[in-house]
């Protein structure tokens, strides 16, 4: 599958001089030193690096789920560090989607109910939320599994449901933390195919943290986190 093309030159996310230091007593650990990059609308970006290099920490900061020591993150022009917790939550719900290595679906709810959840949090009527969620679940091949709970789905199906949940609000950017790390090679490739296909159709940007260089090479751009800084990694 060919790499998706950018839908626009507009910037949807800007990270400027991000630094993160953890302190415990007299011990200080610098995880991120000076991280800066921009993400265009419709662009797909992979972030790679050694285990413990701070990839997940960076993703959590970008998503407004962790605080930074220094620097700024802007999502669609909103500076996350200057917003209240409630306003950050609204930006996440409006502009961002999240996919994790483990699906984090709510076990007591069906696939349809899980995918509806972000729309209901927005205040959408239940009937319309169900319509949009069922349409997207059909798009990811789960039209016959709408009323199955996560325990009744395979690993690949659960992760496809998580992709649908991340995309149901048509966010500006989806952040993925090893989104295929818990899948076998075949299912991992299918989930990547799906994300790139939806990227082309919807125009959502993706930032994926991954240890898999082969899959990272399918993204528009790859950055490597090394010694707390991001380095451009040229695709072969």
Image (cartoon, rainbow, N blue to C red):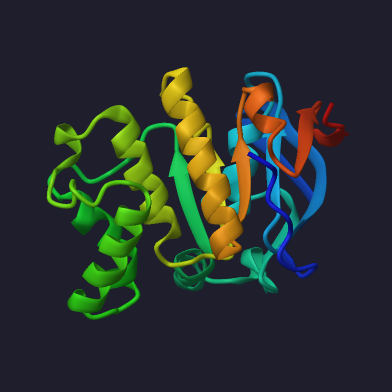
Q: Nearer the viewer, residue 191 or 171?
A: 191
Which corner quadrant of the image does residue 221 belong to?
top right
Which corner quadrant of the image does residue 72 belong to?
bottom right
**72 left or right of 84 in image:** right
Could you tell me which quadrant the N terminus lies in? top right
Question: Residue at point 84% right, 26% down?
Answer: 236
Question: Residue at point 45% right, 44% down?
Answer: 99
x, y percent for residue 129: 26, 72
x, y percent for residue 39: 74, 56
x, y percent for residue 41: 70, 64
The relative height of residue 42 versus residue 55 in the rendered view (above or below) is: below
Viewer can see residue 205: yes
The relative height of residue 93 versus residue 112 in the rendered view (above or below) is: below
Question: Residue at point 52% right, 65% down?
Answer: 171
**206 left or right of 156 in image:** right
Which corner quadrant of the image does residue 58 belong to?
top right
Viewer can see residue 175: no
Q: Nearer the viewer, residue 191 or 29?
A: 191
């Amino acid at each position: 599958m060919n790499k998706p093309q950018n839908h626009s030159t507009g910037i949807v996310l800007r990270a400027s001089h991000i630094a993160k230091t953890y302190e415990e007593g007299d011990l200080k650990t610098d995880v991120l030193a000076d991280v800066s990059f921009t993400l265009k609308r419709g662009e797909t970006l992979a972030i790679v690096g050694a285990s413990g290099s701070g990839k997940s920490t960076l993703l959590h900061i970008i998503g407004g789920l962790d605080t930074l020591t220094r620097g700024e993150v802007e999502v669609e022009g909103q500076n996350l560090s200057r917003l209240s917790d409630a306003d950050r939550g609204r930006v996440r719900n409006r502009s961002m989607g999240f996919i994790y290595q483990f699906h984090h679906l709510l076990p007591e709810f069906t696939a349809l109910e899980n995918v509806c959840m972000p729309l209901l949090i927005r205040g959408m009527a239940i009937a319309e939320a169900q319509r949009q969620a069922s349409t997207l679940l059909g798009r990811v091949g789960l039209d016959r599994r709408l009323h199955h709970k996560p325990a009744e789905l395979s690993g690949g199906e659960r992760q496809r449901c998580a992709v649908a949940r991340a995309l149901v609000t048509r966010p500006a950017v989806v952040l993925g933390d090893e989104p295929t790390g818990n899948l076998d090679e075949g299912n991992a490739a299918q989930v990547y195919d799906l994300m790139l296909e939806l990227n082309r159709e919807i125009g959502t940007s993706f930032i994926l943290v991954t240890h898999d260089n082969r899959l990272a090479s399918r993204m528009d751009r790859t950055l490597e986190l090394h010694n707390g800084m991001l380095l451009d990694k040229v695709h072969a």
